[in-house]
Image (cartoon, helix red, strand yellow):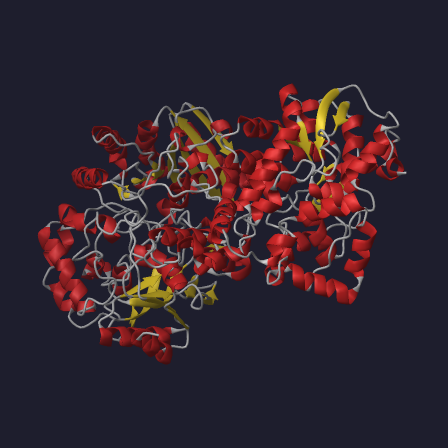
Amino acid sequence: MTDLEGELRAAVRGEVRFDATARALVTMDASNYRRVPLGVVAPRDADDVAAALEVCRERGVPVVARGGGTSIAGQATGTGLVLDFTRHMNRVLALDPEARTAVVQPGLVLDRLQEAAAPHGLRFGPDPSTHSRCTLGGMIGNNSCGSHSVAWGTTADNVRELSVVTARGRRARLGPGWAGAPDGLRALVDGELARLRTGFPQLPRRISGYALDALLPEKGADVARSFCGSEGTLGVLTEAVVRLVESPRARALAVLGYADESAAAEAAAGLLPYGPLTVEGMAADLVPSPAALPRGGAWLFVETGGESAAEAHARAEAVVRAADVVDALVVTDPGGQRALWRVREDASGTATRMPDGTEAWPGWEDCAVPPARLGAYLREFRGLLAAHGLRGTPYGHFGDGCVHVRIDFDLLTERGVARFRRFSEELADLVVAHGGSLSGEHGDGQARAELLPRMYGAQMCALFERAKAVWDPDDLLNPGMLVRPHPLDAGLRFAPLPRRPVPVAFGYPADGGDFSAAVRRCVGVAKCRTATASGPAVMCPSFRATGEEEHSTRGRARLLHEMLAGEVVTGGWRSTEVRDALDLCLSCKGCRSDCPVGVDMATYKAEFLHHHYAGRRRPAAHLSMGRLPEWLGAVDRTRTAPLVNALAGAGPLARLGKRLGGIAAERQIPRLAPETFTRWWGRRRSTGTGTRGTGVVLWPDTFTEHLSPSVGRAAVRVLEAAGLDVTLPPSPPRGRSRVCCGLTYVSTGQLDRARTVMRRTLDLMTPVLETGTPVVVLEPSCAAALRTDLPELLSGDPRAARLASRVLTFAESLDRLAPHWIPPRLDRPATGQTHCHQHAVLGDAPDRRLRAAAGLTGDLSGGCCGLAGNFGFERGHYEVSAACAEEQLLPAVRLAPEDAVILADGFSCRTQLEQLGGVRGRHLAEVLAEGLEEEGLGETPGQAAK
């Protein structure tokens, strides 16, 4: 333990961590920059903050205050001590509906404040797209804005008082009338009144530099407002009193289509007199699928409010009539509005990839110009991009003249970094020429502070330095930001990564086969750090269960980044830090779809485990559950299922078996079926039962084969009732294993074994692949493995891609191959959970159509059941597994009507429901087969088994 660490442990009551994991997690924010800190402190209160500052001041150690780590300019990183406010100082301390104020701590996530204010019809006005994970402290530090700033202004417009601790330990309550001002600040301002009155551009989104003009007498000498946007360089925030605004009772969203972004930008300012809540702009090259949008090449999202839905709708229609548009759409349905807003909010992530997959980066994320000049500015901006051979996709707050953009800078080579600098300097001049601000929302940080003299001139920047010296004479707080800045091209986070691809097992087709590029996908927008899953979203269940950064998708990506860099995490593929962080990854693949940039942590985990255990002894669970198909195949060949069930039910033997197999003691071992699905199929086929319709091959996955053959029998009944001719894959030679997707081997990182199993499967399936017959897979996780893991592990075998393209889920097969078939009418409510792999890889639109056609009403919940294959069975995972189930699945089942159908297509989901909820979940095939029986349209699974 270092002397600094020991002194901090003695001085503060909160956590003090100097280990590699804690440091690696905060080397980066959402910017292009990386700095390695000495350690991290999670203070419990203002006393802890003051104590930590005292220790660091005595040792000359710089201090950086960090919130959600979503800053885009680099100001949430540092080389000294990082203060993490999200762990303890994260509460709403008071809320006064009459005064419309709230008292909050700096680590409070914005959405938690909105939830507390909503019952009173109130809200905090500023709402960045990262509202589900950004903190109030970070918003105050950056003077954040969000899409509603045209109505409710910036964070500075909504702050009443701030409690801060200065670097020298002074505690102050900042407010109007010089309240809390440090000695010397008033004298500095009084001596520079003329400069402060004339030296700042007048526009709504001027965030760059220090807001010293807020200290002018005619502006109330508001020290709290002046402190906003100081990026943690003047003092450390410990508490804030913020203003709340009345939330409209109803809202409508007018989506206006224009020919291009310049036309949309030029129209935006003209809509402000209509009092909109938002005027957001986005071009077609940022929208994956514009099907839900009106015609056009760019769109404005204009939100209106009112006391009633009719009033909000009328205001939206007035906006449409006033706008000269190609096409327009007014959406009043809240669900439809949320779906459209998700497209806009995810732009900060989706913009990090160009349409061809090329990486794009922040750095010029939020310049702002007067709204009336936005159209002209965007045309010149596009021209500047072209002149430098760069590409970017502008979007953002067009009503405020603020543009977000990610640009395909080459930040990996000296030549590319040099071009990054030249472009930055020329763009700064362009912004200034239009009367704009280098930052219109996210602050200057390292990305723009070096260029502030181009905007403000040398004398104003010297005044900023003098102000910093008044507040922080020792330059202890976040040095290198705003004044005396680090160069904008120094400390880039890509610099320490390997320059050549490291040898890997998966193909990573979207990243050119480069594992480093795959890891670079995580840009830190931290959508995985949301505390609650919304709608059908899955990512990231382990973070929501633990609240720990290292168990978020971003945290794991950061550790993998540092593993590749080799400076903080030094063990390479043998790293225990990475192993421990990945241990609670459920491999749910939720990040593959929910992460705006498509991070696939399940694949990265499998890759890491493959290398980590190469030539080493594996955990018992990898052998017991990772090789489950082999064990169950042996049981089938020896006809010992009854014996295995008896032993699993015998207390002492079951406990011993679970201990030896690395299985959680709290878990019950599922019972094996007395007859496998394929044995039933062989008996049934001998009777001549079958149809002569379109042929399909039904995949006998391990779970259906050995544990839930009733699902396979039910699927056969339904598929044949729909007119499909069902067969099974070719049988293997005696004593050999049947087809297998390799899922259990992949999830435990046994990738060499997985490839062997997959190749054997392809050999068996070759005759089927030559016919083009569809392959129906009942278990969603197996279908996802065949769709994604198979072609990515065997990228050199064309048969892998052919099989992947033939895979259909149960609902997809009926949707595509029997489109005119009418399922039995059940007319019952349904509840349950969409399988996480179905959500992430396969999609559930056919399932929803099939349920609707059968009269099964209600939506299935999102999230993850928590069992997730072997995860929930492994020793040490039970509590997290149960917490995941309690998030959405079990509450949904408890609240369901008595006659509700509990749907769970995955064996893991059904097992979790049975073991934790005491209820039986059923595959959709089973429910439809039962309906066929009731209608007299087919034999039941029970009859078929006789």
Front in this rendered view, residue 533 or 807: 807
Quadrant that contains the C terminus = top right
Indicate whether 107 appears above or below 363.
Answer: below
Question: Residue 864 in the image: x percent, y percent?
Answer: 60, 50
Q: Percent position (x, y) of residue 291?
A: 50, 27
Q: Is residue 883 left or right of residue 709?
A: left
Q: Which quadrant of the view contains residue 829?
A: top right
Left or right of 471: which side holds 732? right
- Determine which quarter of the picture holds residue 481: bottom left
Q: Is residue 850 left or right of residue 136?
A: right
The quadrant of the image that shows the N terminus is: bottom left
Q: How many marks?
A: 0
Q: Is residue 232 visible?
A: yes
Question: 223 or 488: which is nearer to us?
Answer: 488
* In the depicted structure, whether residue 524 falls above or below residue 722: below
Residue 536 visible in the picture: no
- Viewer-nearest residue: 63 or 124: 63
Q: Residue 426 occupies which quadrant of the picture?
A: top left
Q: Is 624 rendered above or below residue 509? A: below
Q: Position of residue 33 (x, y in %)?
A: 29, 51
Residue 355 in the figure: left or right of residue 870: left
Task: Identify whether 381 is placed above or below 637.
Answer: above
In the picture as drawn, the residue positioned furthest to the bottom comes out as 10
Residue 557 percent location from the top left of the image: 42, 51
